[in-house]
Image (tube, grey):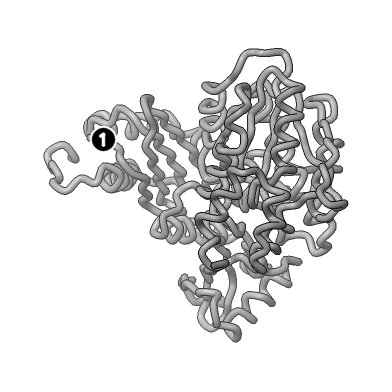
Amino acid sequence: MHTRPPIDFRIAEVSGNTPRLERIRSLLADSGLGMDSDITTFVEAWSGEQLVGCAGLAANVIKCVAVDAQLRGENISARLLAEVENLALARGHFHLFLCTRPCNRERFQHSGFWPIVQSGNNAVLMENTPSGIERYCRSLRAKRLAGKRIGAIVMNANPFTLGHRHLVEQAAKACDALHLFVVREDASFFPFAARLKMVKAGVAHLANVTVHEGSQYIISRATFPAYFLKETGKVQQAWSEIDLLIFRNYIAPALGITHRFIGSEPFCAVTRQYNNTMHQMLAGAVEVVEIPRIKAAGTAISASEVRRLLKTHQFSRIREIVPDTTFAHLEAHYGVEVA
Amino acid sequence: MKIIREALAGTLESSDLMVKIAPTDGELEVVVRSEVIKQFGDQIRRVVNETLRAMEIHQGLIIIEDKGALDCVIRARLQSAVLRAAEEKEIAWGTLL
């Protein structure tokens, strides 16, 4: 009888290890998967000289899990996941997310993962605890506010502009209470702490607005299953749907949210598609209100414009499109270079 | 003993189990999933509860993913996970038997 060498597990750092990554890339391709660019580490399963399985880790998100077709059914993916969980914990991540195709849902349920939401046949988002989202909702419920019309805005505020302030003011006026979530992920030019501070200062004059720190469950790396669908359009769509399903099924009910406010998006195709998807996904559950962007000097105000102006030190033009509170922050942190 | 940090112990190999522990504020929540839950679910839960009681664990989230482990393995894995999660330096071996 043919015997296979035992499986051993190795860790491969993605940075500067191209020849080794080629084997992972081809293993993924055999399973119809691409490699996501934000993966920093792979756990590999080797059987002798052959790479038979891999699982990628990007911060606290597991993705790109593949096992050689000939070795499926030997529990290799479960062993891979256990290795990844140990690795992640050693790096400070205990709460893990995993995004996969719905056909793999059951397999990962046997490996310590619980489904959160599923977008049709495209994607399912799972987490490695049975009570993660439930616990989060419980913490949100404690911040419920009384009123008939309860609004919500999710913003990155990179940085907080007059456009953001206009959106918040309009929404606050239309609601009894407004929950404002600042995207937590530190993938922007301005770090989360700075963005949160600028938002808080910029809306301090509005009594019925509560500023929330964002979470893993709102527009985060975890809700971005970018790897398992080749067509980028589909990937984008699946990502938007996952994110909005979590909002519709968990966050909105926990806070009693009746309206979600968004700014119209003239520049960014990704945000525009997200906005369109929002209209479809929230229909019947939460009313979506799109507020036109305000303009300054003829063009719509955008945070990316502020970042561009900041790079070229055009503070007088920045002053025209951000509130004083944001300007004070920019001056304090980036103004020195101008002198 | 008090759960103060997240911890893992064990594997998802056949005949083993993986234990995940996280701190909570207040309640004790124990989740058991097992491939042999129909035959041995009650017995597994009994071993888990007795082990936690002996170690005086009254709060925390305990997740157990069992792949058909023997009672002694369940107890040992759970004990190591708890000791890690409690950052226990001095182990009272008498309570671990």
Q: Nearer the viewer, residue A37 or B8?
A: A37
Quickly name the residue at label 1: B2
The chain containing the residue under callout 1 comes to: B
Q: Nearer the viewer, residue A265 or A80?
A: A265
The residue lying at 45 percent from left, 49 percent from top is A94
Can you give x and y, in whole percent of width and height, for residue A327 in the image?
60, 50
Q: Nearer the viewer, residue B55 or B45?
A: B55
Quadrant of the frame with the C terminus of chain A: bottom right
- Classify mark 1: helix, strand or loop: loop
The residue lying at 38 percent from left, 52 percent from top is B10
Can you give x and y, in whole percent of width and height, for residue A69 in the image?
68, 68
The residue lying at 74 percent from left, 39 percent from top is A244
Looking at the image, can residue B13 be seen?
A: no
Question: Is A32 displayed left or right of B9 in the figure?
Answer: right
**A122 w.r.t. B58: above or below:** below
Quadrant of the frame with the N terminus of chain A: bottom right
Q: Nearer the viewer, residue A16 or A335?
A: A335
Total marks shown come to: 1
Quarter of the image where one finds residue A74:
bottom right
Q: Amino acid at mark 1?
A: Lys
Quarter of the image where one finds residue B50:
top left
Can you give x and y, in whole percent of width and height, for residue A86 in the image?
42, 57
Identity of the residue furthest to the bottom in this view: A19
Quarter of the image where one finds residue A318:
bottom right
